Structure formats: structure tokens, C-alpha cells
Image (cartoon, coloured by chain):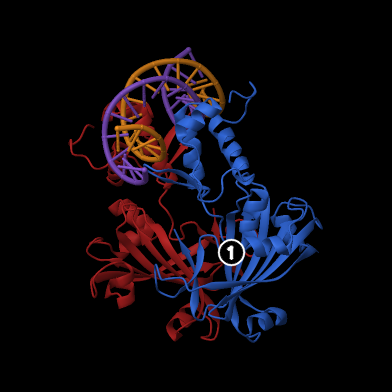
Chain colours: A blue, B red, C purple, D orange
Amino acid sequence: MTSNKLRRQPLYEQIKQLLLRRIAEGEWQEHAALPSEWELAEELSVSQGTVRKALTELVGEGVLYRHQGRGTFVAEAASDWGEARLQTIGTRAGRQEALMQELLGCWKANAPEEVSELMGLRRLVPMIRVRQLWRLGGQPVALDDAYLPAERFEGLEARWLRQAGGVYATLQRRFGVRPKTVMEQMRVATLAREEAQLLLVTTDTPALAVTRLSVSIEGEPVEWRMRYCLTQQVAYTHLR
Amino acid sequence: MTSNKLRRQPLYEQIKQLLLRRIAEGEWQEHAALPSEWELAEELSVSQGTVRKALTELVGEGVLYRHQGRGTFVAEAASDWGEARLQTIGTRAGRQEALMQELLGCWKANAPEEVSELMGLRRLVPMIRVRQLWRLGGQPVALDDAYLPAERFEGLEARWLRQAGGVYATLQRRFGVRPKTVMEQMRVATLAREEAQLLLVTTDTPALAVTRLSVSIEGEPVEWRMRYCLTQQVAYTHLR
DNA sequence: GAGTGGTCTAGACCACCAG
DNA sequence: TGGTGGTCTAGACCACTCC
């Protein structure tokens, strides 16, 4: 693991990248155990402490998890809700009723200018647009509209999204990318006619509009998403 | 720093607690430099690596910050907005217009039952209630209603809040407590007459209701807060 | 050049888990 | 009992900052 003499990145950073690549290539499935710290250290010709630092950071980023005495394991792919939940108002650990996902469509599109700009991409760059509807107990509660750079995620299609069960799971399993939210904006919004129809409410029903910008661990823009939530029965909840 | 033989906590954890205590007691002011890692190690009779681990965690918790080649410094007290901002919609790093703070009141009160329960306190435990109004360019944009356990924060009064410029800054400077948000719920709400009057809007104006539960680094309940935001011009923004 | 944090190594021992 | 992660040490060298 001595790599090039002119290395700019620390060793543990190179190890992180290497492990991310090998996970993305399917070398270890979700919940599979990685080799022990000592085995990895020997394989990569670095000290156990350096492997440890790399693993610790990947645990912090949600890619791995550890159990003392058992080993280090690959974490599940993130859901499209990340650390957020839809939870009954006023409860802290309230059980999550089953949130059903319905893929409305996935097609090539141009993103609105302000979206490209926010993602640091040039104007009119080709994008993939994904729309999803979320139901709680049969009733629509949320509507998603996501844009992803088409060149970076070439081949992404509806079938993959359905198989993996969401955008983030697809990005992780097919492209080895684990999205990290860097900005989330919340405001009250009124719905356009189309959105209102999909959510089965009238256009004068105020909704919670969540705008989210996500990047990869390496920092490249991954997704911009607009989500409308109906919060009469549930609240958009962040847990940490 | 050998401490008791029957130690349950790792050394670096004890060092964290010790440093937190000394910061709370005012040994180092905000932006003041701590002794170097080696000096601390010698003073506490531990290795530099152990001090380093403690410092690294405190940096991660926002208590300290480091500059390579310069030193380790005490971070500023958190604002009542934590990692949140009120920002123009659609901007990522948009400059923050001056948000003016107005303390409406600070008095002893009983918290609603569900608040005590959520904080893990017994019913009807005495609390301190703090109300604040936030203005942007003179216009009211947010209204806060916070509850804190009175026994834990005895002596907290309006004068302190005004001096420190907020609840969180007061907790840190007077009590050495740095609140950490563990739950945040967002929903659309209608305002009661009193809230609407304070925010200078009619009761049929939908507002963004943010409910936040905060604990100390040690995990004790610190604050429950309800915040109403008017999001016509700005969005409630999280940056990470 | 002196002092700081940042990286990396090698080795020791402990706490926890599984067979 | 053997293997895993968790803690702690001691020492080396590098990168950055300031004088």
C-alpha cells in the first residue's frame, strides 16, 4: 500500500476509497463481515491502526457498522428518507407504520436552471428525473421529484429503482455511491394542480415542502430533490 | 490520570469530561487556545494519542476546533438556531441577513404533560419557559417557545439570556451545557390567535412548526422547543 | 527554526463474543 | 479458548504556521 511516492492523500483515505470500491463491486454484500483489521492490515501492507482509522470513518459515514468481539459489517443501503421519518406528532421513538412506495416515473429531462446551478452543473445538462409517491395506510402522504445527473448515472432506469426499492439504494448498489445530504430546506408551500391531484387534496391545502441537495462522499453532486409532505397526521422527523 | 482502579470509563472519556468542566468554569474563553496535546498529555499523565482522541471527539461535537500548525481552540457558543438557518429559498451559501432577537419573557411554568414525558421527566416538574421573537429586516419571521427543567438550570433569568444572546449561549456559559438536538419534527400548522398577533399575520396563515428536543452531551434532557416560522420569504435551512 | 496538529507504525493489554 | 474490536502507549516523521 505504499502507492506513488507523490501521494497527496493520507493512507487511511486511500484505504477508504479502496474499501468503498470493493463494496460497490459487490465483494461484500450487505451485512457481510469484512476481513478483520489485522487481515486487512496485512493484505494492504499497512499497520492495524491505519486500517482502524479508515474503518472508523466509514462507520461514521454509515457505510459500515461494528460489533465488539464479532467484526465489521457492511451496512444496509440508505432509504430515500435518509435520517428522516414520517412519525406521529409528539412521539420520539414511535413505531413507523409501513410507508409504501410507488414509482410514478423515471425519464430523461432537463433540470430547471436553479437546480443545475445549485448542483454545480452547467445549464441544460441532461438529467434523470424520478417521481415517487409515498403512502401511509393507503393514503398518499408525500410526493418526490428528484433530479440526477444523467451522465454520471447512465443506465439508471425504472426497473433498477423498483428492484432496489428506491433511488438511494440503487445508487449504492449499482454505482457504489452513498448520497449524503448537505442542504435541506423546509417551508410551507401550496401545491400545483398536478401535485394536489396525486396527493388527493385540494390546491388550497398547505403542504410541507422539503428541498434537499445530496452529494457523494467524494463531494460530487448526486441529487436534488423536492418533496411535498402532508403533515396533518404525521410530522417530518429528524432523529440523531 | 490513573484514576480509580475500578474505572468503567475509558481514559479519553474522562479527559473529555475534565476538559468540558474546565471550559465551563471559564478556564479558557471562546477562541482561546488550549495547551498543546503534549502539554495536556504531560499534565494529565497520559499519552499524547489519548489526549488526541479526546480532543478529536470534542471537535466532532462542536466544542473545540483545530488549526494545523496553530493549535486547538474553544468554539463559540451555539446559537439558538444550531445548524439551522433562515435562508432565501434556493440558495446554498446565501448570506444570512441579520436576524434580530427579541426576548418576550422568561418565567416559571409547568410544561404540558407530553413535553415532560418526551423529556423523560416526571409530570408537573417545574420548568422555565422562554419565549422569543425573531425578526428579519424588522418583520417578525419566527416565534420560539422553550421549556427547560427548572431544577437543573436554577437561577436562569431574563438578564442572563439577554447578556449571552440566547438560550443555548446561556446554557453553555453559565452551566457548561452544550445542547445537542436529538429530535426535530417539522409540520404545517395553523397559528393560535396569540401567536398570530405576535407574528403580525392572520390565524389562517399556515406556518412551519418545528418541534425540537435537545439533550446535553451526557444525555440529560435540556430543552424542548416549539418554533413557528413564516416561510413566505425564507426557508428553514439545515446545512451539514 | 520552533511549535503545533496530522499521519503512521509497532506492540501491549482489555472487553466482548462465539463455538 | 481463540478471534474480534476497543483502548493505550511510545516513538517517528510530515505539514503547516508564525516569528
Q: Which residue is mark 1?
A: A185
Specify the amino acid type for callout 1.
Gln
Query: Hey, which quadrant is residue B21 in on the image?
Result: top left
Q: Would residue A32 be found to the left or right of residue B122 on screen?
A: right
What is the quadrant of the C terminus of chain A in the image?
bottom left
Residue A140 figure quarter: bottom right
Q: Position of residue B179 (x, y in %)?
A: 37, 56
Position of the N terminus of chain A, as image quadrant, is top right
Residue B56: x and y in percent read 42, 39
How packed is label 1: few (under 14 Cα within 10 Å), some, or many (20 or more)?
Answer: many
Res. B107 in view: yes
Q: Residue at x 32, y 53 (%)?
A: B177
- Label total for image: 1
B119 lies left or right of A58: left
In percent of width and height, residue B183 lies at 42, 64
> Eyeballing the image, is A233 above or below B120?
below
Asked whether, in this view, residue A27 is left or right of residue A49, the answer is right
Q: Residue placed at 46% from the left, 78% from the top?
A: B198
Q: Where B114 falls versus A211 (above or below)?
A: below
Nearer the observer, B105 or A50: A50
Closest to the observer: B98 or C9?
A: C9
- Which picture quadrant has residue A104? bottom right
Q: Image height check: is B105 above or below A1?
A: below
Query: What chain does mark 1 sit on?
Result: A
Residue B92 visible here: no
Q: Position of residue B93 (x, y in %)?
A: 62, 54
Q: Residue at x 51, y 81 (%)?
A: A232
User: Residue at point 77% right, 53% down?
Assistant: A154
Q: From the viewer's side, name the closer residue of A19 and B63.
A: A19
Determine whether the residue tagged by mark 1 lies in a helix, strand or loop: strand
